[in-house]
Image (cartoon, rainbow, N blue to C red):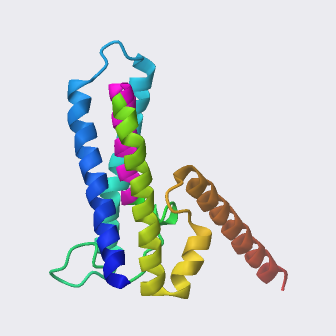
Amino acid sequence: MTEWKRHGDTLVWAAWSVLTILQTLLSFVLYNQEGVESVRYLAWAVWVVMCIFGIVPIFTLRRKGGVPDGKGYVHTTALVDTGVYAVVRHPQYLSFMLLNLFLILVAQHWLITLIGLPAMALSYLIALDADRFGVERFGEEYTRYMQTVPGTNFPLGLIRLLRRRTTHGRRTHSSESKLEEE
């Protein structure tokens, strides 16, 4: 069963890769010159967010993930739940989805959309698989993390992060007030 699972993971990654490469190449060929300019501005905003979620995790995992010397940043030994990982559990898979969305918005062609949507869905499947791996590797700690931080929904992740900080700030303030009263 494990061998089939690994094979399935490889097929999902391969399908995402092929669709994304095809989408990228066709975006140059099928770029809609008469496209909506405001949608293109939105596309470039998506590009910036994509770069943040794609690049920041590399440095975060290297710094806080307990990566052994000589290993790549993906070889973490510690669960990282701060920084970008306090907003979403899978920032790089989110960046893959945002890449596909960027191409859809910038090219503004139906075929680019037709290719990009399943590629986005495959990225989401890859993120779900990463959750299974996280639970296997970090156990209950990762399960609690999953309950607190969304997988790829970064607006929800930002809202939850702000609520946690507000709640934590209130607790700290309340605790200080109680200590002053005693």
Residue 31, x across and y down, in percent: 27, 23
Magenta-span inclusion, residue 104: yes
Q: Reply above or below: 58 against 133.
A: above
- Asked if the stretch drawn in magenta spans residue 158, the answer is no
Q: Viewed as shown, does residue 141 lie left or right of 105?
A: right
Q: Residue furthest top?
A: 34
Name the image quarter holding the N terminus. Answer: bottom left
Asked if residue 173 is positioned above or below residue 21 in the image, the reply reads below
Q: Residue 163, position in %: x, y? A: 67, 60
Residue sitting at 35 percent across and 39 percent down?
A: 115
Q: Is residue 138 above or below residue 86?
A: below
Looking at this view, is 180 or 152 the one in front?
Answer: 152
The quadrant in which residue 122 appears is bottom left
Residue 48 shows in the view: no
Question: In terms of depth relative to the viewer, which is nearer, 75 or 81?
Answer: 75
Tell which residue pokes out farthest to the right in this image: 181
Relative side of 74 to 160, left or right: left
Counting from the top left corner in percent of width and height, residue 146 is at 56, 72
Residue at 39% x, 27% y is 110
Quarter of the rendering containing residue 41: top left
Asked if residue 61 lies left or right of residue 80, the reply is: left
Can the viewer see residue 178 in this picture?
A: yes
Q: Is residue 1 above or below residue 62?
A: below
Please give the name of the residue rendered at 62% of the width and 54% of the height, measured from the top-left corner. 159
* Residue at figure coordinates x 52%, y 53% from the top left: 154
Task: Using the rendered view, name the quadrant where residue 76 is placed.
Answer: bottom left
On-image quarter of the C terminus = bottom right
> For the stretch drawn in magenta, what is the main secondary structure?
helix
Q: Which residues are magenta?
A: 92-110
